[in-house]
Amino acid sequence: MGRHQRAETGGLISFILCAFVGAVGMNLYLEYAPAIWQVTQRRFTVCSGIVAACAVVSFCAGYMSQSRSMTLKSGWLVPLRRTFETLALSVVYAATTFLSTFALLGAINEMMGTLFVGYMSSVCAAFAGVVGYMTFVQAEMMSAKTLASLLPFFVVSGVCVAGLTTDDPYWYHNNFSQLGDRTTFAATMFNSTLMLAGVCVIIVSYFAVSELVTTERLMRLWHDRTRDDPNRGYDIPHFTMRMAVLSALLTVAGLAFIGIGAFRYTPHNLMHNICAKGLPFVMLVLFLMLPWLAPRVSRVVMAGSDLAALLCAAFWGNMMLGHNTLTNVEALAGMLFLGWFIVFSRQIAAIEADRVSMELVHAQTAEQREQRERMPESRIASDR
């Protein structure tokens, strides 16, 4: 079997095992859990946790099965880096699965009402099976595009769940910080979503910068300054400094998301304001410095980044004139940053795909050259 067929076969096996674990685990919980843990939100939390655990195990099995670096032939550093990558990606999938499952359970409960209680085990089994299949296949065929596409799912899911379950109907009239400025379940869900979003931004940034470094190294290795030069005839000056600045800005943006969720406004207003007001500044620097930080990225993306910065500035000015609310400005800035980050990650994935294609062509060209050198000369060539 080929790679894709093996991935699909493993995904089906994962579907069966995860569905079984989900059904058994939810049945045991409903039968033996105390009455205080039988309330709706806690049942949904446990169900989402079971589904997320199945997703993590399935992803790790799929991601590690196609790895060739989990040996000590090259020392301890490569296996440790691979293990860190696996755990980091597992955090992304666990967060995405948990919040998306919780949001779907809430929507189904609103539709079915009390009748939904009798279907909890079946729904948990179905969710766990589907998630187990998807994560195993995605782990086998992992790409940066897949990873970047996960980010908006759990962010939107977590914010929607927090907004739908909050007991403060006036939070929208002030700002998003009011949604998380309490100790209720909705506030905890909102703050956890922001912290996990920050973790995901840092993780995806690590893979993006690593790909840029790998591509630049290969480009310089193949650089021959001819018309067919894959490096397009130039080397990026001060490349190490650019990658260091890009890594620092993306990491600070992720830490700002974490800080907004970790420091609620009421008890930690100073730290909360530093993170909340510092994030737009980091976004502005990223948008405006993108041509210098990542010159191999498409110019359309660079122009889109500038337009996003202008749009945020226009909305901010409109708010200062009293024609808009701070919540709307925060929502726009957050969605623009997530959208920009997804587009940026997909650009990195496109660069990776082009690099792999060039590696294949380069290998084929080298092989053909070696074959020509090994071929014996013809009779006419020898006579010459």
Image (tube, rainbow, N blue to C red):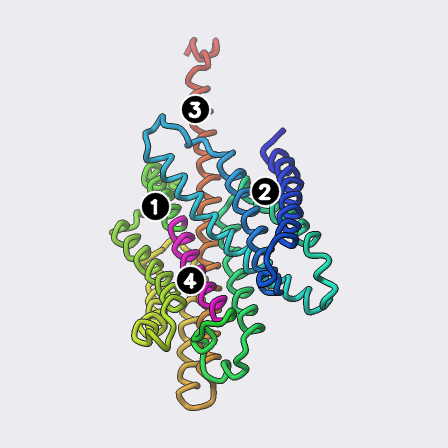
Judge left or right: residue 316 versus residue 32.
left
Judge left or right: residue 267 versus residue 137.
left
- Find out whether residue 205 is within the magenta segment: yes
Tell me how far mark 2 sits from mark 1, CA to CA. 27 Å
Residue holding disc 1: 213
Viewer-side residue, 168 vs 237 = 168
Q: Badge 3, how many Cα within 10 Å: few under 14, some, many 20+?
A: few
Residue kind at label 3, given as amino acid type: Arg
Q: Nearer the viewer, mark 3 or mark 1?
A: 1
Viewer-side residue, 382 vs 334 = 334
Residue holding disc 3: 369
Position in image of residue 267 (x %, y %): 34, 75
Q: Residue at x 36, y 27 (%)?
A: 72
Tell me how far mark 4 sits from mark 2, CA to CA. 27 Å
Q: Which callout, 4 or 2, points at the residue further toward the start of the chain?
A: 2
Residue holding disc 4: 195
In what element is the residue under mark 1?
helix
Tell me how far mark 3 sits from mark 2, CA to CA. 37 Å
Q: Residue at x 64, y 51 (%)?
A: 26
Q: Badge 4, how many Cα within 10 Å: few under 14, some, many 20+?
A: many
Label pair 4/2, CB-CB below 8 angstroms? no
Q: Badge 2, how many Cα within 10 Å: few under 14, some, many 20+?
A: many
Q: Which of marks 3 and 4 is in front?
A: 4
Q: What stretch is highlighted in magenta?
A: 187-207
In what element is the residue under mark 4?
helix
Using the image, determine if residue 297 lies above or below residue 19: below
